[in-house]
Image: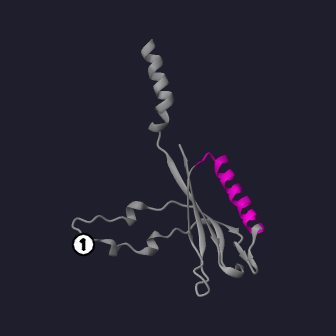
């Protein structure tokens, strides 16, 4: 009887590790282009991609079949785009836009959680404006959710 309780206790604590988990990535792209002329969005893919169809193996260091894989085959057709505001307006950083984006991103995260997803990781990066001759830049954040 004691062994049964121990087994049930172990299954309770480690049982989730035995269940397959599913991951989903949501990306926010926020423009840091001056004058608000960039495009900012939350992107949610609406279909799965086939990893097997786009992956090749090398048997020798320089032999590759990647030439047989076309970039167009990697693109998906279904996705959701949620418009965000740009970080810059005509006079500089627009803090109201940042707060508005925060509210929209929070709404997306809350929506995902209500669908049974759990926020597992957040990763971000910046390609910033390099000065007068650059004029380009984005702030990208990937929200990695899991469930199962």
User: Is residue 133 placed above or below 3 in the rendered structure?
Assistant: below
Residue nearer the viewer, 134 or 146:
134
Q: Secondary structure at mark 1?
A: loop
Residue 63 lies left or right of residue 102; in this view the side is: left
102 within the magenta span: yes
Towards the viewer: 136 or 148: 136
The residue singled out by tag 1 in the image is: 62
> Predominant secondary structure in magenta?
helix
Identify the magenta region.
Answer: 96-119
Taking the view exactly as shown, the residue that stands out farthest to the bottom is 133
Instruction: Residue 56 in the image: state x and y as whole percent.
Output: 32, 65
In the displayed structure image, the side of residue 106 where residue 5 appears, left or right = left
The single residue placed furthest to the front in the displayed view is 131
Q: Residue at x 51, y 49 (%)?
A: 22
Q: Position of residue 70 (x, y in %)?
A: 40, 74
Residue 136 at x, y = what percent?
A: 60, 80
- Outermost residue to the left: 60
Q: Say if the magenta span includes residue 28.
A: no
Number of disc labels: 1
Does 114 appear above or below 29? above
Q: From the viewer's perspective, is residue 23 above or below residue 76?
A: above
Percent x, y of residue 36: 71, 78
Crowd band around label 1 with a 10 angstrom C-alpha radius: few (<14), some (14–19), many (20+): few
Name which residue lies at 37% across and 72% down: 69
Image coloring type: one colour
Q: Place residue 129 in its image quadrant.
A: bottom right
């Amino acid at each position: 009887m004691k062994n049964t309780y121990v087994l049930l206790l172990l299954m309770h604590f480690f049982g989730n590790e035995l269940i397959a988990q599913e991951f989903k990535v949501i990306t926010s792209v926020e423009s840091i282009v001056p004058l608000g002329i960039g495009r900012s969005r939350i992107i949610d893919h609406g279909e799965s991609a086939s990893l097997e169809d786009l992956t090749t193996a090398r048997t020798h260091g320089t032999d590759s079949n990647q030439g047989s894989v076309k970039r167009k085959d990697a693109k998906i057709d279904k996705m959701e785009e949620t418009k965000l505001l740009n970080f810059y307006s005509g006079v500089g950083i627009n803090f109201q836009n940042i707060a508005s984006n925060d509210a929209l991103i929070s709404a997306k995260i809350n929506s995902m959680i209500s669908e049974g997803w759990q926020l597992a990781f957040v990763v971000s990066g910046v390609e910033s404006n390099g000065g007068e001759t650059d004029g380009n830049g984005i702030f990208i954040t990937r929200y990695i959710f899991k469930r199962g």
